[in-house]
């Protein structure tokens, strides 16, 4: 099996090509946000009924870097679905991410690793759904990330939060290598729909 380093190099090149070839994928993926919320949080009547009951959801997105899929269309769709939004902040290198409340147009600063993030005085929140970028994924919810471990540490620290990847369908692999510290996603949202992860054999 190919090493993770080689997989990352191959997946970065593939994702860059996808971003150039299909920039409208993010908007199409956002169109499946209701189906995703129905699958994850909808009881009888789906997510629309949950909203009618007064349930609001806090969703953590990310600010895209490089060829990561744009989250702006999904942010708009989630806001229309009565969700509150947050963004991750790296505040310590070997610690889980901190999530701070965010709205479109809000002034952002730079966190410890130079990513755009809410300012330190903005309220920290506990998201019920964490949307993460990725380089590749498989049907069992395994995710190939950049290798920094931030999301794995965060998932371990927040086991009750739903974990969703945002990606192009073509980023799928048959099976990714999984290590002890890797925590599987609950599903992946792509330009062709929302797909729950399958249980590993």
Image (cartoon, rainbow, N blue to C red):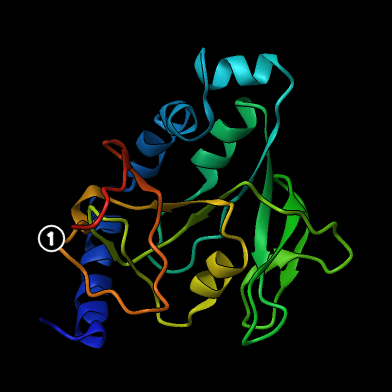
Residue 19, x across and y down, in percent: 30, 57
* Residue 54, quarter of the rendered image: top right
At label 1, counting other C-alpha atoms closer than 10 Å, the crowd grade (few under 14, some 14-19, many 20 or more) is: few
Residue drawn at the location 37% of the way across and 47% of the way down: 187
Q: Quadrant of the C terminus?
A: bottom left
Q: Horizontal placement of 111 versus 48: left or right?
A: right
Say which residue label 1 marks.
174
Q: Quadrant of the N terminus?
A: bottom left
Against 94, is 103 above or below?
A: above
Using the image as rendered, state which of residue 176 and residue 71 is in the foreground. 176
In the image as oriented, which residue stretches furthest toward the right?
Answer: 121
Residue drawn at the location 73% of the way across and 45% of the way down: 103
Residue drawn at the location 38% of the way across and 72% of the way down: 145
* Residue 100, quarter of the rendered image: bottom right
* Residue 6, quarter of the rendered image: bottom left
Q: Horizontal placement of 90 versus 72: left or right?
A: right
Q: Horizontal placement of 181 versus 119: left or right?
A: left
In the image as oriented, which residue stretches furthest toward the front?
Answer: 201
Using the image as rendered, state which of residue 108 and residue 141 is in the foreground. 141
Q: Dot 1: what SS?
A: loop
Residue 29, x across and y down, in percent: 37, 38
Against 52, is 117 above or below?
A: below
Using the image as rendered, state which of residue 196 and residue 13 is in the foreground. 196
Residue drawn at the location 72% of the way across and 54% of the way down: 126
Q: How many marks?
A: 1
Residue 128, x across and y down, in percent: 63, 46
Against 130, is 40 above or below?
A: above
């Amino acid at each position: 099996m190919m090493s993770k380093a080689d997989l990352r190099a191959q997946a970065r090149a593939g994702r860059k090509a996808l971003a150039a070839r299909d920039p409208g994928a993010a908007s199409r993926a956002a169109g499946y946000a209701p189906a995703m919320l129905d699958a994850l949080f909808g009881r009888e009547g789906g997510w629309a009924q949950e909203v009618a009951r007064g349930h609001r959801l806090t969703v953590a997105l990310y600010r895209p870097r490089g060829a990561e899929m744009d989250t702006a269309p999904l942010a708009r769709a989630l806001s229309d679905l009565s969700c509150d939004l947050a963004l991750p902040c790296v505040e310590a290198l070997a610690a889980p991410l901190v999530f701070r409340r965010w709205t479109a147009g809000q002034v952002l600063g730079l966190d410890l690793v130079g990513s755009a993030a809410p300012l330190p005085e903005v309220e920290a929140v506990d998201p019920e759904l964490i949307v993460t970028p990725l380089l590749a994924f498989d049907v069992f919810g395994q995710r190939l990330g950049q290798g920094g471990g931030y999301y794995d540490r965060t998932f371990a620290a927040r086991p009750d939060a739903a974990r969703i990847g945002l990606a192009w369908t073509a980023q799928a692999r048959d099976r990714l290598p999984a290590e002890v510290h890797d925590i599987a996603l609950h599903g992946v949202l792509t330009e062709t729909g929302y797909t729950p992860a399958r249980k590993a054999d």
